Image: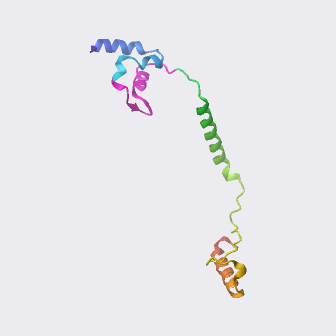
Amino acid sequence: MMTDSEKQAMRDSVRGMPLSQAKDLPIYDAFKGFWNGGMPANELQAICDGAIVEPREMTADEARVEAARDHMVEQMANAHRAPVNDNKTPGQPFARDGRPMSQLADHERAHEQMVRDMGNAWKGE
C-alpha cells in the first residue's frame, strides 16, 4: 500500500514522461481494464497527470481504412454534381398481372398504357 505522499510523488514524476512508460506505473493499476472516452482509462489518467503522448506510425490497415473513408467522403461531397436521369421510367415489357405485353389484346394493352401514364403523371411524362 502506498502512502498519499508516495502517490503524489509518483504523479509528479509522470509529468514529461512518455505515455508508454507512464501508463504502466503502479498508481494506474486501479484503472487497468477500464475504458474512458474511447481509450484505456490508465492512459487517460496518465495524460491528465502530464504524460506526453508520443506520435506513432500508422499501420498499413489503418492507412487503407483512412484512404477508403476519404474516398467515400469525397464521393458523397461530389454526388450532387453527378447528372441524375431518374425521371424516366424504364420500359415495362410486362403487364401488371405478369403477362408479356406482346400477348395482350389491343384493348388490354391500351388499358395498361393508360394506367402506366396515369401513374407517372406526377413525373410530367
Q: How many marks?
A: 0
The N terminus sits in image quarter: top left
Quadrant of res 35: top left
- Report the coloring of the rendering: rainbow
Q: Identify which residue is drawn at 66% across, 43% down.
A: 74
Q: Which residue is outermost to the bottom?
A: 107
- Residue at the spot 66% in from the left edge and 46% down from the top edge: 75
Q: Which quarter of the rendered picture does the C terminus lie within?
A: bottom right
Segment colored magenta? 30-53
Q: Establish if 17 lies above or below 98.
A: above
Relative image position of residue 115 (x, y in whole percent): 64, 80
**Quarter where residue 11 is shown:** top left
Question: Where residue 54 sits: x, y (%)?
Answer: 53, 20
Residue 50 within the magenta-colored segment of the rendering: yes
In the image, 52 versus 98, the foreground residue is 98
Quarter-of-image position of residue 118: bottom right
Residue at coordinates 40% horizontally, 12% vertically from top-left? Answer: 13
Magenta stretch: includes residue 98: no
84 up-or-down from 71: above or below: below
Residue 12: percent from left, percent from top = 38, 13
Is 85 situated left or right of 72 in this image? right
Whole-percent x and y of residue 61? 59, 33
Residue appearing at x 59%, y 28% in the figure: 59
Name the residue nearer the viewer: 78 or 32: 32
Q: Is residue 32 left or right of residue 120?
A: left
